[in-house]
Image (spheres, rainbow, N blue to C red):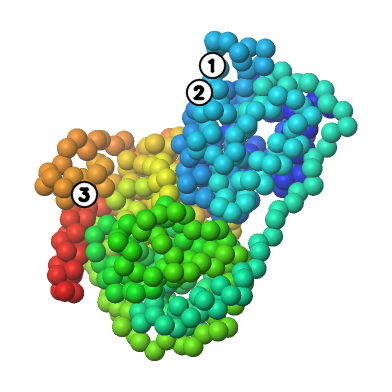
Amino acid sequence: MKAAELLVKCLEAEGVTHIFGIPGEENIDVMDALLNSSIQFVCTRHEQGAAFMADMHGRLSGKAGVCLSTLGPGATNLVTGVADANLDRAPLVAIAGQAATTRLHKESHQVLALPDLFRPITKFSTQILEPENIPEIVRKAFKVAQTEKPGACFFDFPENIAEMQVENAHPLKVQQATQSYPPEIKVKQAADLIREAKYPLIMIGNGVIRAHASAALKNFAEKWHVPVLNTFMSKGAIPFSHPLALGTIGLAAHDYVSLAMDKADLVICVGFDMIEYHPYLWNKNNQKAILHIDSSPAEVDEDYQLAAGVIGDINVSLNAIAALATAKKDVTLINLRRKIVEQTTKHNTDNTFPLKPQRILHDLRQVLKDEDILISDVGAHKMWVARLYQAEQPNTCIIANGFASMGISLPGAIAAKLLYPDRTVVALTGDGGFLMNSQELETAMRIGTPMIVLIWTDSEYGLIRWKQEAHFGRASNIDFTNPNFVQYAESFGAKGYRVQSADELIPTLKRAIADNTVVIIDCPVDYSENMKLTEELASMLGESK
């Protein structure tokens, strides 16, 4: 069989169901081999969109999403999505066509040293130079991508290698190492630390979701009676409605959540990754004791010096430490929950127009079921989603916050809908981020992935204005104009609505769900609330002193 056919068989053996990408001259043998495969090729309109789809597929499923491009500019267009997956700890395997090996040694049309280009943004990057090596390279790419901490892997496939014949080669057995159990002495040390702390606080990261450890986390928090903070990327790992949940940590300005962190003398970091909320922001000068519970050892950082580390299967570690619990009685930090809940419910009934961010998120939460999926793009709206959207289940509020790339929400929503066709999927984006990958509306319509794209429109880069005004007291070069989003949606065969008043949003969302197609909702937003929030949080900090 052809080497390209062997590659496809190896991908099938890895359980790949979808490949996102764009065909090109140098990957035509792979494209032809896919015609006889169970794998669905999703032809996208831009390679960045393909990489974001693979990124989201990996993050939601735990199995590496796959994206495919041709050489040169096709491969370089993958870079942003691949880097996003790598820093957001989403398993992804990127494959690029490549020129024939007979011209890789010299200046040649569209030729770049792609393994070198991808090496800094992946866990593993290589090139297939012999057809017999395909099974090993594919197996290694998937194993490395899916092993904690997961991330991206890359290989290119020269066109002359792809068309070669290969005999007696077959996919390798799929194996993944199991997580080790934590040492008993470390479990006891952790329990002693919690028992001795006056104000212990749990901070969970995305590793809890990846480990499917939400139930164990909840049991752990309840047994020790310790409140829980989540990062942007671990929303829903503990339900916001849980009485020990204090909400999301990571807003640049101080809020009640930050005050809880300020008070804590022991921070129990579970599945936490520094890219989510760097310790120099919450533990400068090592004033807090840190208990690290994760499947991977802690990163070396001067502000993340451990009192103890419990390394192993997160579920096993949490349950073992919980078994030694003697419940903490101090409720100082838990009492902050009332104020935090109050903050999330302010302006829920505000009828001003354009709509306040608080009202939009309240109405969206009223319409979506607990299991429905909200995927946030990057911009000012992301900060509001992180702070106010009340996630009740893991992987139902997705925020890219490791690499934090604009343009991820629309292609990400396509991947989410392919994985969960029975759930409502909403891509929440600003008007700046939307147009960065809006061409994928055509992809969504063509492959039949109904979803809602909720655009917060203000005709400027709102988060940058927020930062500029906070720093300089004025804005610089952040304005732009938009198309008519309703007509834009209709030009793709999708449906479009524009919200004209506050009381129209809920019925519009319900109509969009009932439409069962791709729907764009243009929702004007009042981002003057950004600076009001900054002033409110500054005032709150003054009150707490």
Q: Secondary structure at mark 3?
A: helix
Binning the other alpha carbons within 10 Å of mark 3 as few (below 14), some (14 to 19) or many (20 upward) gives: many
Point out the image quarter for the C terminus. Answer: bottom left
Q: Amino acid at mark 1?
A: Gln
Q: Secondary structure at mark 2?
A: helix
Point out the image quarter for the N terminus. Answer: top right
Q: Earlier in the sequence, mark 3 or mark 2?
A: 2
Residue 270: x %, y % from top left: 49, 66
The residue at the point 54 percent across, 16 percent down is 110
Mark 2 lies on residue: 73
Mark 1 lies on residue: 110
Numbered-mark total:
3
Q: Amino acid at mark 2?
A: Pro
Q: Earlier in the sequence, mark 2 or mark 1?
A: 2
Q: Earlier in the sequence, mark 3 or mark 1?
A: 1
Q: CA distance from mark 3 to mark 1?
A: 41 Å
The residue at the point 61 percent across, 46 percent down is 145
Q: Are marks 2 and 1 in contact (CB under 8 Å)?
A: yes
The residue at the point 58 percent across, 75 percent down is 185
Work out whether residue 201 or residue 89 is closer to the camera in this orientation and state it: 201
The residue at the point 48 percent across, 66 percent down is 292
Q: CA distance from mark 3 to mark 2?
A: 34 Å
Residue 33: x %, y % from top left: 75, 30
Left or right of 254 in this view: 77: right
Compared with residue 193, is residue 50 higher up or lower down, i.e. above or below? above
- Residue 503 shows in the view: no
Mark 3 lies on residue: 466
